[in-house]
Amino acid sequence: METMDIEVAKVLFKALGAGLVVIGAGLGIGKIGGSAMEAIARQPEATGKIQTAMLIAAALIEGIGFAALFAV
């Protein structure tokens, strides 16, 4: 009986960890996107450089999120 409870707890904590990873990655990418839009509004001539930096940072965060999901 106890081993079943431990297995259920493991699954629940893994699901909780995966949810936190997804929420954290989403918040990080959202913050990057919002900051990039503010930067483009202030300096429209730098749009290309800002978008490139934003996409690279978002891809890195997403990659870390995927790695964390596989670690869970």
Image (cartoon, grey):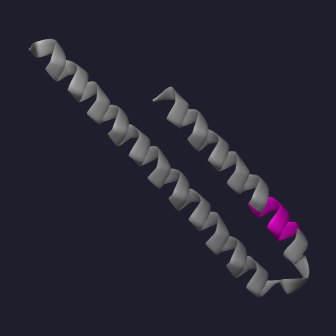
Count the labels in the image: 0
For the point 71% across and 72% down, the residue is: 36
At which x and y percent is residue 70? 54, 30
Instruction: Determine which quarter of the picture holds residue 48.
Output: bottom right
Left or right: where does residue 26 sit relative to residue 38?
left
Q: Position of residue 39 (x, y in %)?
A: 74, 78
53 left or right, relative to 59: right
Question: Would you place residue 38 above or below residue 11 in this image?
Answer: below
Is residue 44 positioned above or below 22 on the image? below
The residue lying toward the viewer, choosing from 8 and 43, is 8
Q: Which residues are magenta?
A: 49-54
Considering depth in this image, is 34 or 43 the residue closer to the camera?
34
Q: Residue at x 88, y 76 (%)?
A: 46
In the displayed orientation, state which residue is furthest to the left: 1
Q: Is residue 26 magenta?
A: no
Q: Kindly identify the residue that appears in the image at 86 percent across and 76 percent down.
A: 47
Q: Main secondary structure of the magenta part?
A: helix
Q: Which residue is pictured at 85% across the width and 85% down the height?
A: 44
Can you give x and y, in whole percent of width and height, for residue 55 in the image?
77, 59
Quadrant location, the C terminus: top left
Where is residue 9 drawn, in percent x and y?
Answer: 22, 28
Q: Quadrant of the N terminus?
A: top left
Which sits in the foreground, 49 or 29? 29
